[in-house]
Amino acid sequence: MKEHNKKVSVSSRRGFFKKIAASAVAATAVAPVALSAKDDALLKEPEWGKKLGDPVNKHLYGMPSPYEHNVIRRTHELLSSGDFYASVAMCPVHELEGIITPNGLFFNRCHGGVAQIDPNEHRLLIHGMVEKPLVLTLEDIKKYPKESRIHFIECPANGSTEWRAPQFNTLQFLKGMMSCAEWTGVRLSHILKDAGIKPGAKWVLAEGADDSHMGRTIPLEKILDDAMVVFAQNGEALRPEQGYPLRLLVPGWEGNLNVKWLKRLEIGDKPWHAKEETSKYTMLMPNGKAVQYFWPMEVNSVITRPCPDYPWTHLKKGDIVEIEGLAWSGHGKIKGVDITFDGGKNWVEAELKGLVLPKAWTRFSYIFKWEGKPLLLASRAYDEVGNVQPTIDQEVGKMGVENIYHRNAIVTWEVKANGEVNNVQIRDYKKEREMIKKDAKEEVKKWM
Amino acid sequence: MDVRKISKIASLALLCVGFAYASGAKEIKLKTPSLKERSVDGAMHYKVKNGVYAGVYRVNTQVDKIKKFNHGRQATKEEIKFNDIDVRYDWQGLPDGKGSVAQGEELYNKNCVMCHGDFGAGGKGYPTLAGGEKSSLKNQLLDPDSGDEPPVKTIGTYWPYASTLWWYVKTGMPFPHPMSLSNDEVYAIVAYLLSLNEIQIDGEDLDDDYVLTKEKLMKVHMPNEDGFYPNVNKYGPEIMKKFLSDPSNYGTQTVRCMKNCPTGKVVHIKHTLDEAINPPVTTKRDLPKETKKEGGANSKYAKLFEAKCSACHTNKAIAPVIGDKEAWAPRIKQGKKTLYTHAIKGFQGMPPKGGNADLSDADVKGIVDYIVSKSK
């Protein structure tokens, strides 16, 4: 994540990369309960079969089983800009099923705390290069025809601790800055009919009502294409962490652009260059120049079972198990996913399953016979525009390691003979060093 | 897996346009859409066809015929003026005002230093606001054990526009209560931050008595102004479409290598970050441990503390942390009266009422009692 990287680079980098022997790093997880030969669960009437359950009026808003109390977002003090108000809470991706993230587990990244907004006092202001500047209440917005669509949202800093070397032995912290939900709202193209866009307009500033007054520039073309203002996720009102009562949804694009607590849209003829598109969320290349705007989240995938948090330590030799994972791309639908067992030398095709939707999480699956032999297991997704997830060398060779954002390189799990799973990287530092180009001129000229 | 089978599946999906054999590797090159089929971000451009969007979602098609819905109402000039708080890179939106470097330093030391450090040097976990060299932007700390130096990105080395600084200080800082500085105060702080970053205006250094005005600020050219691409100011969003439609610009591939692919060495975790994960990761299914009832965690003063004081008093780099008995013992020894006075009037790094002028004295005292009760 960006600030963490900043911190690493400026102040305490050496302390940060603490010296810990590789052998001390073990999977953090506890394997699921294995059935023993003497299991007696079915030889006695359980406690809950001998008494009444809770009355229906006990939880008028339902809660997960108390046994699920470890299925939660998690935080890390280094993934912040100094405190937990400009920070992130990571989604437990390793615990999720299907493609929908429950609202209480949706990752939460904010820049000035989670604003608690009174919906009665909230307004959306639309102004700038429009015929009729508009004020809309939430009820006004809900009068327009609504749409529900399933899209992931991913922070472009997802996985950014891994540019230089592997550092987290948990999927939750490797890829937890993303989630996927069904969003309900109104296409901005409908609302902007009422405002009437003036000729020459090209850009839109979206701004939040929270402490950070998050402002981001978005091209009008996207706003009129598939962007929405949304007020609901997974059938209920947005959670405060997701911008209650209103957020912008720019499907497939950097999480930060999906401005939460949306208060203002200004239409203009030039980009704004807000803090989060200059100081941050820009990608510094090895040539010393930075890519300023980078909108879509690239094609990506990760194996979720097994993973370091959810290893195969409970498997017996000969067990037939499913290797399962998530693939996603901001460029469109997932076309397919390949899997390797030998660290990327040879690949086979996995199968997609369930709904295959544009700019949404997509599940892939591969049935495998576990023989207790060590594996280097990885997935590689490709999408509708023909983009293929890169190896670490391919990505770093082009981007270097200092750009913080948009890391979509292949994630590899080392599966040990005992079923333990570790996050490893397959890379060649020497080759990367040779590939990295430090000359800015040819690279940058054609874009200036 | 049989490669011939792969090729068959792939060509059935109309993806495979042939095999390439590079150094013995078997590769499948994917088909890519033309620019015309793409959106502004290089993504597939989806349309509604026969009432179905993107081939998957049914949609209401009546809406196309509706010219206007006429919901909401016209915004007033006053509403727009009050909320139009941004400052664009071409300075659209910059209000009048003025402030000197010396005033800025004073304001900085009152409102910002506790987080951003003396002279913006950072060190407390919050962003560093000055220092470093622009030439460092080419640095790459590739292998953490290499001894290489990373780039240093600060206002002076990295930010392309001073407009962004004015805008952000006005609307985003000070972090615990933004929108509290007057325009003149923002000019003064921006002057101070520019001077810390050794920015000149018209070839002139920003000394202590330098007074920054709107006209002067609009002359600032930041050292890294030309450090960003593609040039959207000149070419608009269209250039981004070209850039994003070609994945070779950002290291993503268009080829699936299937057999005998080049790989690398296995790099294990050497420097783990797992220890500080909160709470530690586990997939256990058990009942939560009985947590001790936190006395009055929902009380008025607990909530006020959370809202008004916790930004500093939960970070030991800045202030004594609530619950840290060691840090509070000598302070509590001074007696409640002194603590009240220090909390209300300010004390060294502690701003008066923590910077919340809206809090009544009684409330501040209530919060201090709460802090003390938690920290004994």
Image (spheres, rainbow, N blue to C red):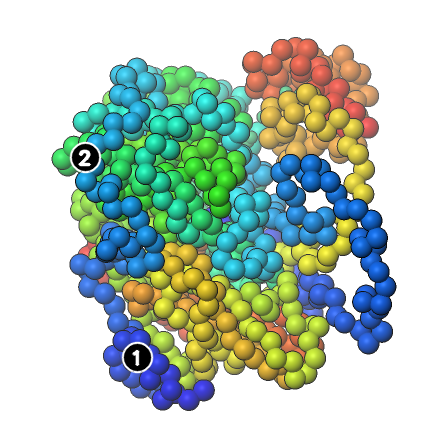
Task: Where is residue B57? Give x, y as percent.
Answer: 34, 54
Q: Earlier in the sequence, mark 1 or mark 2?
A: 1
Amino acid bearing label 1: Leu
Q: Is residue A188 left or right of residue A72?
A: left
Amino acid bearing label 2: Lys
Q: Toward which corner of the image does residue B184 lie, by quadrant?
A: top left
Question: What distance separates the C-alpha of mark 1 from that of mark 2?
Answer: 43 Å
The chain that hosts pointer 2 is: B
Q: Toward which corner of the image does residue A383 lie, by quadrant?
A: bottom left
A269 vs A74: above or below: above
Q: Nearer the viewer, residue A16 or A103?
A: A103
Residue B216 visible in the displayed image: no
Q: Nearer the viewer, residue B135 or B91?
A: B91
Q: Is residue A38 left or right of residue B61?
A: right
Residue to which mark 2 is pinned: B67
Q: Looking at the image, which residue is at 82% across and 58% down?
A: A46
Q: Looking at the image, which residue is at 25% across and 25% down?
A: A133
Q: Which label lies toward us, 1 or 2?
A: 2
The chain that hosts pointer 1 is: B
Residue to which mark 1 is pinned: B12
Q: Toward which corner of the image does residue B183 lie, by quadrant?
A: top left
Q: Nearer the viewer, residue A58 or B255?
A: A58
